[in-house]
Image (spheres, helix red, strand yellow):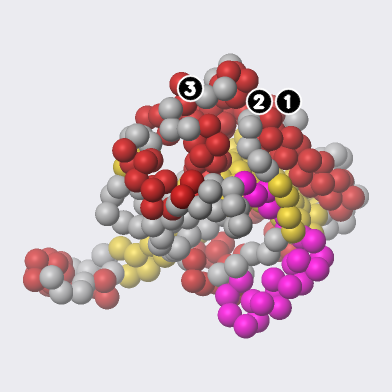
Amino acid sequence: MTAAYDIENFHTALVEHGLIVPTGVQGAYGRGAAFEDIVRGFNGIIDRIAQADGAQEVMFPPIVARALVEKMGYMDSFPQLAGSVHSFTGDDAQARELSERVHAGDRWEDMLSPTRVMLAPAACYPVYPAFSGLLPGDGRLITVMNWVFRHEPSDEPTRLQSFRMRELVRMGKPEDVLAWRDDWLCRGLELLRGLGLHAQSDVAADPFFGRAGKMLAANQVEQRLKFEILVPVISLEKPTAVCSFNWHQDHFSAKFGIRDADGATAHTACLGFGLERVALALVKAHGFDSQAWPQEVRTQLWP
């Protein structure tokens, strides 16, 4: 059984079957046509569910305002994961110096200046300021898909620096938001198990930084604010999180003035499917050739 969950062999087989394409950068592989077909198929399932639930779809670029990342408190909790966008703003002489450094193999990054944007650390971040103010009577449900960046370079196929998250964000009264989160935990398990995955749920914590972060993580677990759905992809003992559920309480809504129909500060929660991780879980469960997958799985992905 150990060999069946060997990381290096799994990575090699993904490359050999054209599912992923090495780029020379850890956690930044390309995606082949068959891999993208799986991602589109699963994302299509979420499309149909979101439409039936009356979710409002929005799209944002893979960058967010630096001020938003700061306001969210991301740099306090996850500085080790952040990706900042820098650009050249110098004059002709500095441009020549930069070019000379590049061709000489010298370091040149200090000649770039921070811009007003950063790589998006979470797909849902732009949603909260975009929907500030008074909510409708039954709250609001938003769906978004975006590229996300986390600085976690690794050769492990499920741990990427750049990946896509498909999220649903619920805003409303505390009891409604919590009930939605709990209901979707069951729905998420049913959905993934229906695709032949050995999915289980567990309480979880975010990777907060430093000693203070350990206290934040412990508090998150104690209050059961975060759950994950886990599927064995590269390990039986340490299954991979393919979906996460976060109840923010009023953490974001207070920052952006999101109020329920009664005027009180609303609560928010989000769930996110890691599209690459779900695709890899399906490959691990059913094989490298999606044409040979069980018909009941194919019918759901490609109706």
Residue at x 87%, y 56% (from the top left corner)? 264
Asked if the residues shown at circle 1 and circle 3 are in contact, with their CB atoms under 8 angstroms apart, the answer is no
Q: Calculate the distance from the C-alpha at mark 1 to the C-alpha at mark 3.
A: 30 Å
Q: Residues within 10 Å of mark 3 (few under 14, many from 20)?
A: few
On residue 52, the disc is 1
Instruction: Indicate which label's residue lies in the foreground, 1 or 3.
Output: 3
On residue 292, the disc is 3
Q: Is residue 226 magenta?
A: yes
Amino acid type at image mark 3: Ala
On residue 48, the disc is 2
The magenta stretch is: 208-231
Q: Calculate the distance from the C-alpha at mark 2 to the C-alpha at mark 1.
A: 6 Å
Callout 3 secondary element: helix
Asked if the residues shown at circle 2 and circle 1 are in contact, with their CB atoms under 8 angstroms apart, the answer is yes
Is there any visible trace of residue 123 in the rendered image?
Answer: no
Callout 1 secondary element: helix
Q: Position of residue 178 (x, y in %)?
A: 84, 50
Q: Position of residue 9 (x, y in %)?
A: 39, 48
Q: Residues within 10 Å of mark 1 (few under 14, many from 20)?
A: few
Callout 2 secondary element: helix
Amino acid type at image mark 1: Ala
Q: Nearer the viewer, residue 227 or 102?
A: 227
Question: Is 216 placed above or below 162 here?
Answer: below
The image quadrant of residue 299 is top right
From the viewer's perspective, tell me whether residue 244 is left or right of residue 165: right
